Image (cartoon, coloured by chain):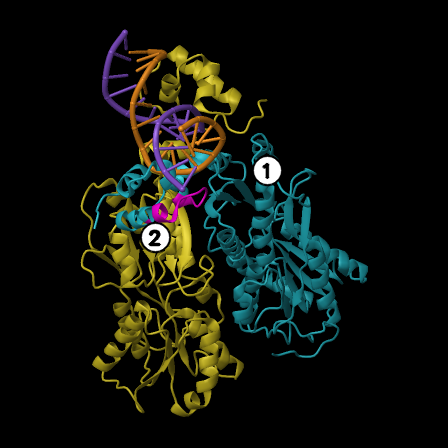
Chain colours: A yellow, B cyan, C purple, D orange
Amino acid sequence: MDNKLNHSLRELAQLAGVSKSTASRVISGNGYASPEVRERVLKAVEQLRYKPSAVARAMVAKRTHNIGVIVFRDRLPIVSHTLYGRIIDEILMAAEALGYSIFLKTDREMSLRSTDYMLEQRVDGLILVSRLQKNVIDYVKNFNIPYLMVNGSTEDPDVVHLVSNDEAGGERAAEHLYACGHRKFFIIAGPGEHRSHSLRLAGFRKRLESLGVCSGQEGFTVAQSSESSFDSGRKLMEEHYAAFLEGGYSALFSTNDMLALGAMKVLMERGVRIPEEVSVMGYDNTEVAGMYHPSLTTVSVDASGIGRDAVSILDRLISGEGSVPRLIEYESEVIVRQSTNGKEDGTCCGTGNT
Amino acid sequence: MDNKLNHSLRELAQLAGVSKSTASRVISGNGYASPEVRERVLKAVEQLRYKPSAVARAMVAKRTHNIGVIVFRDRLPIVSHTLYGRIIDEILMAAEALGYSIFLKTDREMSLRSTDYMLEQRVDGLILVSRLQKNVIDYVKNFNIPYLMVNGSTEDPDVVHLVSNDEAGGERAAEHLYACGHRKFFIIAGPGEHRSHSLRLAGFRKRLESLGVCSGQEGFTVAQSSESSFDSGRKLMEEHYAAFLEGGYSALFSTNDMLALGAMKVLMERGVRIPEEVSVMGYDNTEVAGMYHPSLTTVSVDASGIGRDAVSILDRLISGEGSVPRLIEYESEVIVRQSTNGKEDGTCCGTGNT
DNA sequence: CTGAAAGCGCTTACAG
DNA sequence: CTGAAAGCGCTTACAG
C-alpha cells in the first residue's frame, strides 16, 4: 500500500495518533500501553509495514547483538573448508538460537584489519578461529571486548580457548593401528606451525614409542607436508611412492583427512589395495571420509560442540554473568571404517569391510 | 594506555582540541583540515585507539554497507553444503572487495522471518538463494529494497536472477555419455520441485530422445529421489540394485554429484567396476568429485561467476547506476574424469583412466 | 579552514 | 497510562 522505503517511529506514532514514546513502548514491548492504544499502534504497524531500525536501536542500546567471527587463514576460501565450514555452520545456528547474528571475515594471520573492522561494527563479541599471532590477541585485549579463541594455541593464561584434544586423538589413532597389528608406519604430517597438525603428530609418535615402535628403519617415518590439502597429500605420496613401497609400510596415518585421501588415491591408482595391503587413517572426520570408497577410518573432531559452546560461552562473557573456564578441551574418538583392517573395538585385525 | 570501551568523536575532538565537525572531517576524509590540525587529530586517534562507530555512521548515511544473504532450504546446514558453500564463499570474497559485509541466514521456503530480520538490519540489498516461494518475492517487493535471486526459478519478469543453464548442462551430459557409446541409461533424479534437478533431468532426457534413445525397456529409466544427498543416492541404488543389474544399464547419470557418489559407492561395494562395467556421471563439479576414486565425471556449475556477479549486480542495483539484465545464465561444461569411459573430447570411448 | 547546530531513528528516565 | 526531552555517535550543510 504505502511505498516509502522505511518509515520512522515518528511517522508510525503520527499515524497512530500517539507520541513516539508510546509507540516505542508497544513496539519494543517495554513499558505500558492501554489496550486501545496498543491496538491503534499495531494497526499502524501493519499499514506502514513498519520495521524498527536495528541500527538505531543498536545506537542507543550500545549493543548490536552481532558477533564477529574471524578465521585466520593464509588462503581462502573459508566457508567451504571441510572443518572450518562445519564449525562455522554450528556457530551460525547457535548464534541464531541466542539471538545473535554473525559477521564473518577471513584474515591473514598477522593482520589486524578484520579486527578493526569488527570493532568499528561494534560487535558484542569476537570469536577468533585458528592459529593467530600473539599480536592479534594483544591488540584485542586493548579494547576489552569479550572474545574467545577456537582451535588455536596460546600461552596466554587468561585467553578463553576451545580446542579439541588433538594429542589424545593422535594417541588413539596410533593405538587403533597398532591394535590392528601394524608395526611399520608411514606418517604424513601437515604444517608444523599449526597446533592441530603438530599435536596430532606428537600424540601419534608418543603412543607408538610407548608401544615400542621407534622412529626409523624398523618403525615409523614422518613425511612433512607444508600444506594440508588433498593435492599436497597426493603430491607427497607421488614423491615418496618408491620409498613407500620399499619400506614395507603397512599403515599410513595423516594428520588430516584431506592429506590421507590424496595419498590414498595415489596408492589405489597404482594398484595398492586398501586396506588389504595398506591401512589408511586420517583425522577430522570430514564428510568426505565417510563417502569415500573405501570409506576412511579417521578421528572425529567435535565441530558441533565447539561451535555451540563458542557462542554460548561468548554470550556469557558478553552478559558478564557466571564465570567461564579458560580452557575447554573436546575429546576425539576413532571412527573405524573400511580403510583400516580392524574391528570396531579397535583391538584386533579382521578385514572389516563394512 | 586508555582502557575505556569505545571513545566517541566528542572525546576525540576534545583531546585534539578541535570541534567534533573538524575531527569528523579528518576521520572520514571528507572536507578540509589544515595539516597541523589533521596531525593533532590523528595523534589523538592513536592515543585513544579511536574506532569510529559504523553504527552511528550507518544511522546518518542511511546505508549500512551490509548485504543480506538468505538461503532458502528446508534443512541446515548451509555453509558446509557442497554447492551453496562455494557460492557463499564467492559472495563473501566479492563483497569484501566491494566494501560490503554479509549477513547470512537460512530460512525455510515459505518463511518471511529472515527477510524481516534483514529489513530491520537495514541491509543495503538482498541476495535470495535457492528456490523460494512467490510470497517471499512479493513481500520483498513491498519494500523496494534492491534484491536479486540466485539459483531459483521465477515467472516474474522483473526479478533479476542468476541461474546456471541446467538444461543445456543436462543435454551435454547426455551427449557425453552417448558419445562414449552408451545406449542404456539409469538416471537418478533429485527432488523435482527444485529447478536445477528438474531442468537437468529435462535436458538429459530431451537430448537422449533427440538421439533416438527412448524411455523404457530399451532406453532409459528414471528413478526419483526425494532428497539430494549422498545417503539418498546410496539408498536409492540399494533399492534398485537388482533391477539395475537385470536392466543391463551401462551408464548412470545423477542430477548431482552427491547422489551419483552415493550410488556409485554401492555399485563398487558390490564389485561393479567403474567405468569398465558402468560409467557414472554427476553434476555440480563439487570438490569431492575430483577427489574420489575413480574421480567423477560431472558437469561444472560456475559458482564463482554466480557469486561474483550476484554481488556486483546487486551493487549496481544499490547505487542505481547502469541498468542490469533481468536474467543471466551461466554455461556448464562437462568435466571428463575417470568414472566414464570416454576421451576428453567427448566423442569416443577409450578407457580414459587418468 | 573551522565550529555550532540540526538531525538520523530509536529508547529511557522523568514528569504529568 | 502517556508525552516532552535528552541523548546514543556520527555527518552535513551553513555561517563565520
Q: Which residues are magenta?
A: B26-39
Residue bearing mark 1: B133
Is residue B131 something one can see in this rendering? no
Task: Write the residue at 66% across / 45% down.
Answer: B324
Which one is in front, B239 or A190? A190
Q: Is residue A240 above or below residue B208?
A: below
Where is residue A135 drawn, in percent x and y? Answer: 28, 61
Q: Amino acid at mark 2?
A: Gly
Residue bearing mark 2: A307
Q: Amino acid at mark 1?
A: Gln
Task: Write the residue at 64% across / 43% down.
Answer: B160
Asked whether residue A310 is drawn in magenta, I would say no
Q: Is residue D6 left or right of residue B85?
A: left
For mark 1, name the chain: B
> Are labels 1 and 2 assigned to the same chain?
no
For mark 2, name the chain: A
Residue D15's image quarter?
top left
Residue A34's image quarter?
top left
Q: Residues within 10 Å of mark 1 (few under 14, many from 20)?
A: some
Residue B271's image quarter?
bottom right
Q: Which mark is residue B288?
A: none
Where is residue A301 drawn, in percent x and y? Answer: 34, 62
Which one is in front, A112 or A238? A112
Is residue B176 something one can see in this rendering? yes
Secondary structure, mark 2, is helix
Q: Is residue A300 above or below residue A115?
A: below
Asked whether residue B36 is drawn in magenta, I would say yes
Q: Quadrant of the C terminus of chain B?
A: bottom right
